[in-house]
Image (cartoon, rainbow, N blue to C red):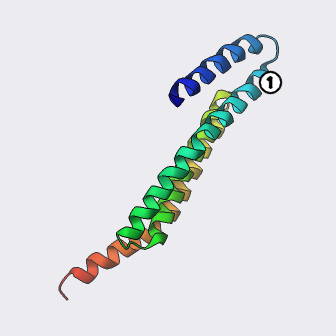
């Protein structure tokens, strides 16, 4: 029932932000950021649990943990960039939000290059000479 707590927090924070926004828009924005961080903190245990399960599966499958680590970093970059872009967009800075999203995509591309390189080398190695 954690989702009920998260949704409840989100609704309460939204109502408070709307009320406060009339008087002090900066406090409303800070409330939005704090509520987002609190929601993220609710999820940290679940994220850690998923990572542990994936690591255990990778070890059982005898996979190179560097691949799993890279994929988890890529997922982390995607979530962090999205979170930052949403906060920036909430502050009315759509142009900066777009730049954050672009930076996230470029960093994901950079992180993915070694994996793509290994895949290509593997495929080329399977082809007859």
Say which of 51 and 122 sits in front. 51
Q: Quadrant of the C terminus?
A: bottom left
Q: Provide the residue designation for mark 1.
A: 26
Which residue is rendered at x = 81% and y = 12% of the image?
23
Left or right position of 81 against 91 = left
Residue at horizontal 44 percent and vertical 56 percent from the top: 53
> Can residue 94 be seen in the rendering of this structure?
no
From what the image shows, is residue 60 above or below residue 94?
Answer: below
Would you identify the image quadrant in which residue 7 lies?
A: top right
User: Outermost residue toward the bottom?
Assistant: 129
Residue at the image position 17 percent from the left and 85 percent from the top: 128
Q: Position of residue 99 (x, y in %)?
A: 61, 45
Of 10 and 119, nearer the camera is: 10
Task: Give the structural element (helix, strand or loop) at label 1.
Answer: helix
Residue 20, given in percent of the width and then of the height, sits at 77, 14
Position above or below: 47 against 121: above
> Relative to the observer, which residue lies in front, 35 or 3?
3
């Amino acid at each position: 029932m954690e989702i009920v707590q998260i949704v409840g927090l989100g609704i309460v924070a939204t109502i408070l932000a709307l009320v406060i926004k009339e008087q002090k828009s900066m406090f409303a924005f800070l409330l939005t950021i704090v509520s987002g961080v609190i929601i993220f903190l609710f999820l940290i245990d679940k994220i850690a649990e998923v990572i542990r399960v994936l690591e255990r599966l990778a070890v059982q499958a005898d996979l190179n943990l560097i691949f799993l680590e890279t994929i988890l970093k890529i997922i982390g970059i995607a979530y962090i960039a999205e979170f930052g872009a949403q906060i920036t967009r909430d502050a009315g800075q759509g142009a900066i939000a777009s730049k954050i999203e672009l930076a996230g995509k470029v960093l994901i591309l950079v992180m993915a290059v070694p994996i793509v390189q290994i895949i290509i080398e593997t495929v080329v190695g399977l082809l007859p000479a």
